[in-house]
Amino acid sequence: MRRSIWGIAVVLLLLLTACGKPPLPEVHTADGTSIDVYLGSYCWGNTCADSVGAEEILKDKNKQTVPAGMVISFAFDGKQPTETGMSLMHDGKLTKVAFEDQSFKAPAEPGVYYYSLFAKWRKTPDSKISDDASYVFAVEVKG
């Protein structure tokens, strides 16, 4: 009987751990170069976590070098988010990023750009209950 209870407890713990964090999207350039992505703030299931901003998370991380105007895409495996949005920080200015079909172009001006991607998964189309997450990544645009 004790083994059975321990077995159930282990299975429940594994299920809770597996469902505890949101999926990381893949971000890559049109030529297939991967860009490192990091999880920011999120509420997923019964767990919420706050993080610092993109610049702080990414200050010691790799900034993928991309040519000006390069197409960058993001994709999620599995269930797709019902809402997504993106902004970038450059020289202290926050700007909304327009994208289509999960793709956008790197800026034309050289420099380091910090991106924040937001995704929300609604439980049902009309539901106000959802899981959500923010993700950050950086690119260095070379002219």
Image: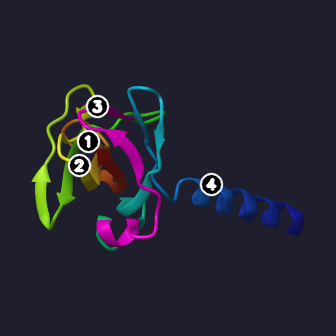
Q: Amino acid at mark 1?
A: Gly
Q: Is residue 64 magenta?
A: yes
CA distance for labels 3 and 1: 24 Å
Q: Secondary structure at mark 4?
A: helix
Q: In this figure, which residue is indicated by the disc labeled 1?
A: 143
Residue 49 in view here:
no
CA distance for labels 4 and 3: 30 Å
Residue 39 position in % (x across, y down): 42, 59
CA distance for labels 4 and 1: 47 Å
Q: Residue at x 25, y 54 (%)?
A: 111
Q: Amino acid at mark 4?
A: Leu
Counting other residues with Cα less than 10 Å from the Cα at mark 2, is it few (<14), some (14-19), or many (20 or more)?
some
Counting other residues with Cα less than 10 Å from the Cα at mark 4, is it few (<14), some (14-19), or many (20 or more)?
few
Q: Amino acid at mark 3?
A: Gln
Cβ atoms at labels 4 and 2 below 8 Å apart:
no
Counting other residues with Cα less than 10 Å from the Cα at mark 3, is it few (<14), some (14-19), or many (20 or more)?
some
Q: In this figure, which residue is indicated by the disc labeled 2?
A: 110
Look at the image and tell me in which quarter the C terminus lies: top left
Q: Amino acid at mark 2?
A: Pro
Q: In this figure, which residue is indicated by the disc labeled 3?
A: 102
Count of labels in the image: 4
Residue 55 position in % (x across, y down): 30, 68
Give the mark nearer the N terminus: 4 vs 2. Answer: 4
Image side of residue 44 versus residue 106, left or right: right
Q: Residue at x 44, y 57 (%)?
A: 38
Q: In this figure, which residue is indicated by the disc labeled 4?
A: 15
Which is nearer the eye, 5 or 132? 132
77, above or below 23, in the image: above
